[in-house]
Image (spheres, grey):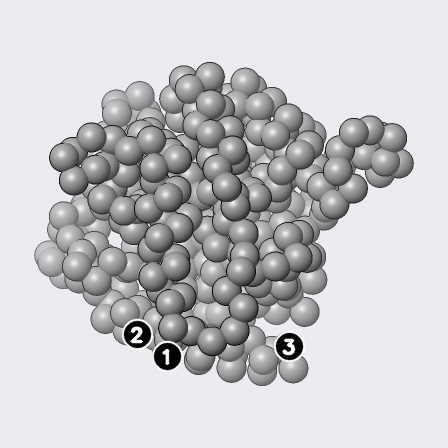
């Protein structure tokens, strides 16, 4: 049976864990003209960081420091938990989510990662990026951090169909993804690799989407089998025992949703694109989940679009009901 995210984090931290989204002030190479412009066709102006408090800015428009963003995020978590029963004690993961959070001056970004880890209650680091934006300096820095802290690198693949990749203006190849997974494993096998996939991209068939899952499974299996660090397995180093080799890797799957003021919204409003219905998406998950091995941690099976920006599909806004239905699907597959 695939592993649930809550179970995985419990095994790492021994308690409830909350992710706080942060903005490192980055952009993307398919936005700034380096590889393209406009960004991916489904991305809003905030990248994937629409839930970052004020987009990482103060009321006066000043960019908040990482520490300030974390404090705001903690208050938001606490406000959501207020009044709930049970133990609310836990730790935080600093989640550098907005745009490509490794795309920038390495020294500056590494300093921001360390600033986050110095904040009270922060026990781990998650960094969202593109497979083609892991510089040797950044990767070495994250590998060093992983010797004392939990580190999670999230790679936005979205699809293994190269033609679809071009259509969505991804501006990188499957080989970039393969190289990134192998390089991370070589640098530090304790780093938890999470891959993002999107179902329902324009023009994709059921076969395309299931092939994307198979591709990710195969590449992560291959990287694990071909990366050997005897010094980690033997424990003859100064790495914390619970942060040594871990063959678990992660997967996020979501159904594509249409946000206002995106290139995808123009296609949708022109009648050139229709998102998946809930029934179509659930049917795909029923076929995709059996393809996932036991050492895969399922981080997400549904998106959480900002309601103020969402055009379609409306079924994604009822998160509680969607999650309950997803749990029934998972139980039916893995009773």
Name the residue at 57% across, 44% down: 123
How many residues crowd around disc 1 within 10 Å: few (fewer than 14), some, or many (20 or more)? few
**What element does badge 2 sit on?**
loop
Residue 87 as seen in the image, left or right of residue 248: left
Residue 136: where, in percent of width, then height?
A: 56, 19
Residue under circle 2?
Answer: 318
Q: Nearer the viewer, residue 44 or 212?
A: 44
The total of numbered circles placed on residues is: 3
Work out how far the residue at label 1 is from the one at label 2, CA to CA, in angstroms.
6 Å
Work out how far the residue at label 3 is from the one at label 1, CA to CA, in angstroms.
20 Å
Q: Is residue 170 above or below residue 329?
A: above
How many residues crowd around disc 3 within 10 Å: few (fewer than 14), some, or many (20 or more)? few
Q: Is residue 69 above or below residue 111?
A: below
Residue 91 as seen in the image, left or right of residue 62: right
Find out whether the residues at labels 2 and 3 contact each other: C-beta distance under 8 Å: no
**What element does badge 3 sit on?**
loop
The tag on residue 334 is 3
Question: In the image as oriented, which residue stretches furthest toward the left?
Answer: 270
N-terminal of the pair, mark 3 or mark 1, is 1
**What element does badge 1 sit on?**
helix
Residue 62: where, in percent of width, then height?
A: 20, 30
Residue under circle 1?
Answer: 321
Work out how far the residue at label 2 is from the one at label 3, CA to CA, in angstroms.
24 Å
Say which quadrant the C terminus sits in: bottom right
Find out whether the residues at labels 1 and 2 contact each other: C-beta distance under 8 Å: yes
N-terminal of the pair, mark 2 or mark 3, is 2
Name the residue at 44% across, 80% down: 325
How many residues crowd around disc 2 within 10 Å: few (fewer than 14), some, or many (20 or more)? few
């Amino acid at each position: 049976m695939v592993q649930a995210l809550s179970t995985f984090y419990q095994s790492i931290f021994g308690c409830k864990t909350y992710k706080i989204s942060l903005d490192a002030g980055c952009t993307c190479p398919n936005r700034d003209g380096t590889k393209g412009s406009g960004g991916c066709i489904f991305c809003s102006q905030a990248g994937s960081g629409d839930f970052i408090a004020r987009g990482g800015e103060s009321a006066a428009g000043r960019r908040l420091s990482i520490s300030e963003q974390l404090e705001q995020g903690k208050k938001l978590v606490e406000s959501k938990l207020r009044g709930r029963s049970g133990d609310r004690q836990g730790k935080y993961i600093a989640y550098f989510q907005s745009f490509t959070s490794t795309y920038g001056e390495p020294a500056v970004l590494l300093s921001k990662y360390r600033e986050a880890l110095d904040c009270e209650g922060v026990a781990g680091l998650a960094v969202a990026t593109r497979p083609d934006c892991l510089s040797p300096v950044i990767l070495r820095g994250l590998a060093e951090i992983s010797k004392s802290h939990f580190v999670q690198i999230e790679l936005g693949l979205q699809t293994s169909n190269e033609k679809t990749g071009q259509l969505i203006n991804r501006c990188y190849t499957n080989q970039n993804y393969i190289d990134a997974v192998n390089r991370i494993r070589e640098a530090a096998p304790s780093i938890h690799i999470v891959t993002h996939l999107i179902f329902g991209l324009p023009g994709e068939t059921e076969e395309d989407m299931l092939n994307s899952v198979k591709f990710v499974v195969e590449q992560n299996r291959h990287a694990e089998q071909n990366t050997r660090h005897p010094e980690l397995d033997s424990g003859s180093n100064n790495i914390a025992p619970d942060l040594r080799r871990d063959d678990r890797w992660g997967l996020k799957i979501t159904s594509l949703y249409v946000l206002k003021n995106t290139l995808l919204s123009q296609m949708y409003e022109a009648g050139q694109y229709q998102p998946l219905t809930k029934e179509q998406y659930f049917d795909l998950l029923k076929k995709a989940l059996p393809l996932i091995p036991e050492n895969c941690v399922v981080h997400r099976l549904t998106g959480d679009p900002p309601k103020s920006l969402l055009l379609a599909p409306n079924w994604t806004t009822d998160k509680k009901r969607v999650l309950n239905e997803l749990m029934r699907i998972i139980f039916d597959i893995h009773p």
